[in-house]
């Protein structure tokens, strides 16, 4: 670190949330502003990760745990439940699949519309320009017609439909769209065109937006100092503010002061840092969860699932919004272009898989606490709520009629996945401290120089992928950092 131990801004992490907060902050910060980014992991370049995945020789030793091994960094009280995330520069941008649908307007007003959960203190119309800004920065591919309001077109044209998708689009119009995605439809912005190889966790052609290929300039700004290998575990609090950020680097205890502090770790670790600091808000750590997903295999008669130009070609909204959300969960459909095969001769490609993704409600029965190891949070998960489970069962009743426009032979269902790799809750947004941890601008209700970023602030959990929304919220929050 620089000799001076005081910074205008200290950012924890280099995730989507941290990056987009910093992006907007730097637009307004003076030329002499000092910013410190504390990253627990290290930068492991994309091409070296591709080589590692292929089993090729690389001069780089991967300094970060594989995202399937991150369970070693928490005390998981429900081992059968996986919590997937990536440690290292760029966070989960290194392993995400690039799916970027917006939330629906009613996702922000569940209490008002359906009597379920709580309304968010920020609404869709307020986030809309920030959605557009993130979409521009990520060079999102998407359609002209969407079921959610939109004031600007997507920067890139939509990915192509498969033959199955075209039939669904004809039947359902604006409720069935080309998926908005950060997987490039056309080459540009230093990225290649998506090759539809279905290995998006480490894109072999660098078509998917990542912090490395799309936002490195944020961290190369001369006002920003990057410190790798710095594991933040706590804060020093003083009445209504944060005085110091505590971290360990190379086995040495260190602390640093910031006029403003922004926590940009994931939902588990942000809560853990606050709990270690002695945050007395009863909601801190509470309401951990994520969406529930399962695969529906649809066997077709004399119709091949071919075509398309990316891994997930389409999103279906037919089971998403409506009065049913008073009783059971919304469902978002994803049309998968992964080459699933049938074993019958002559019917190899007569099958399509839809990933059915369900919202859930935050539950006090799932939460993060401290463990005997101050560096490891303890994670408790009580499973999906009845609200989500009823949504799954209702979907199975409705899907055959919904797919009547296709020549369906039969539908089979896989068991729910043990993760959607979207960790939500624990530091929720609310109008007051009795209902959550941060206010509408993601500022802690008590510690007024502390921003808590990321999907931990979500008031309720929608079926839509969270990355676009948490990034837009970071831009929105940074406007309040001056």
Image (cartoon, rainbow, N blue to C red):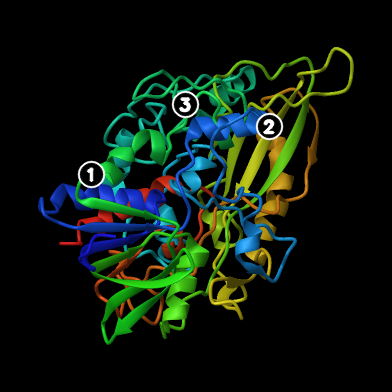
Q: Is residue 19 above or below residue 362?
A: above
Q: Which residue corresponds to the image point at 63% horizontal and 33% vertical from the top-left?
A: 53
Confirm whether residue 87 shows in the render.
yes
Coordinates of residue 179 in the picture (x, y in percent): 49, 32
The residue pinned by badge 1 equals 221
Please state if 401 lies on the left or on the right of 207 as rendered.
Answer: right
Task: For mark 1, give the secondary structure.
Answer: loop
Q: Which residue corresponds to the image point at 47% horizontal and 31% vertical from the top-left?
A: 208
Q: What crowding class fits label 1: few (fewer than 14 Cα within 10 Å), some (14-19), or many (20 or more)?
A: few
Coordinates of residue 261 in the picture (x, y in percent): 29, 67
Seen from the viewer's position, the closer of residues 41 and 411 is 41
Whichever of callouts 1 and 2 sits on the residue coming sooner in the sequence is: 1
Seen from the viewer's position, the closer of residues 436 and 186 is 186
Label pair 3/1, CB-CB below 8 angstroms:
no
Image quadrant in which you'd find residue 385? bottom right
Q: Is residue 155 above or below residue 452?
A: above
The residue pinned by badge 3 equals 207
Front label number (3 vs 2): 3
The residue pinned by badge 2 equals 403
Q: Tell me the distance, in whole angstroms, between the alpha carbons under discs 3 and 2.
A: 32 Å
Image quadrant in which you'd find residue 135? top left
Q: Tell me the distance, in whole angstroms, between the alpha carbons under discs 1 and 2.
A: 51 Å
Task: For mark 3, give the secondary structure.
Answer: loop
Q: Is residue 68 above or below residue 265?
A: above
Please state if 393 lies on the left or on the right of 449 as rendered.
Answer: right
Please state if 206 lies on the left or on the right of 332 as rendered.
Answer: left
| On-image quarter of the N terminus | bottom left
Image quadrant in which you'd find residue 296? top right
Whichever of callouts 3 and 1 sits on the residue coming sooner in the sequence is: 3
């Amino acid at each position: 670190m620089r000799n001076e131990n005081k910074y205008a801004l200290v950012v924890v992490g280099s995730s989507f949330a941290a990056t987009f907060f910093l992006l907007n902050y730097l637009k307004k910060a003076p030329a002499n502003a000092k910013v410190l980014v504390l990253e627990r992991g290290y930068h492991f370049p994309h091409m070296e990760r591709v080589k590692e995945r292929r089993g090729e020789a690389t001069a780089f030793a991967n300094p970060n745990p594989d995202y399937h091994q991150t369970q070693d960094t928490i005390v998981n009280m429900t081992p059968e439940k996986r919590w997937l995330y990536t440690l290292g520069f760029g966070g989960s941008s290194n392993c995400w699949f690039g799916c970027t649908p917006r939330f629906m307007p009613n996702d922000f007003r569940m209490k008002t519309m359906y009597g379920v959960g709580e309304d968010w203190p920020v609404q869709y119309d307020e986030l809309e320009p920030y959605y557009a800004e993130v979409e521009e920065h990520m060079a999102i591919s998407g359609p002209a017609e969407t079921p959610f309001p939109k004031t600007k077109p997507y920067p890139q044209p939509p990915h192509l439909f498969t033959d199955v998708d075209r039939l669904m689009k004809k039947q359902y119009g604006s409720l069935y769209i080309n998926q908005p995605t950060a997987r490039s439809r056309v080459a540009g912005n230093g990225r290649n065109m998506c090759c539809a190889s279905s290995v998006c966790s480490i894109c072999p052609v660098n078509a998917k937006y990542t912090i490395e290929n799309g936002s490195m300039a944020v961290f190369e700004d001369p006002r920003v100092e990057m410190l790798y290998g710095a594991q933040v575990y706590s804060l020093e609090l003083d009445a209504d503010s944060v005085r110091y950020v505590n971290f360990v680097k190379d086995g040495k205890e260190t602390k640093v002061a910031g006029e403003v502090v922004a926590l940009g770790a994931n939902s588990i670790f942000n809560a853990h840092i606050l709990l270690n600091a002695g945050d007395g808000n009863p909601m801190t750590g509470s309401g951990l969860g994520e969406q529930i997903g399962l695969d529906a295999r649809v066997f077709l008669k004399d119709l091949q699932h071919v075509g398309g130009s990316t891994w997930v070609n389409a999103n279906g909204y037919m089971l998403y919004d409506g009065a049913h959300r008073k009783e059971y969960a919304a469902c978002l459909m994803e049309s998968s272009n992964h080459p699933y095969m049938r074993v019958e001769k002559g019917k190899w490609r007569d099958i399509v898989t839809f990933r059915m993704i369900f919202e859930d409600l935050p539950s006090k029965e799932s939460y993060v606490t401290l463990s005997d190891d101050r560096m490891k949070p303890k994670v408790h998960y009580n499973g999906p709520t009845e609200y989500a489970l009823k949504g799954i069962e209702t979907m199975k009743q409705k899907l055959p009629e919904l797919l009547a426009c296709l020549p369906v032979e039969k539908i089979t269902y896989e068991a729910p996945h043990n993760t959607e790799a979207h960790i939500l809750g624990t530091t929720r947004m609310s109008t007051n401290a009795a209902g959550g941890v941060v206010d509408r601008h993601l500022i802690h209700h008590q510690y007024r120089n502390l921003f808590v970023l990321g999907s931990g602030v979500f008031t309720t959990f929608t079926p839509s992928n969270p990355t676009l929304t948490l990034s837009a919220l970071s831009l929105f929050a940074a406007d309040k950092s001056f």
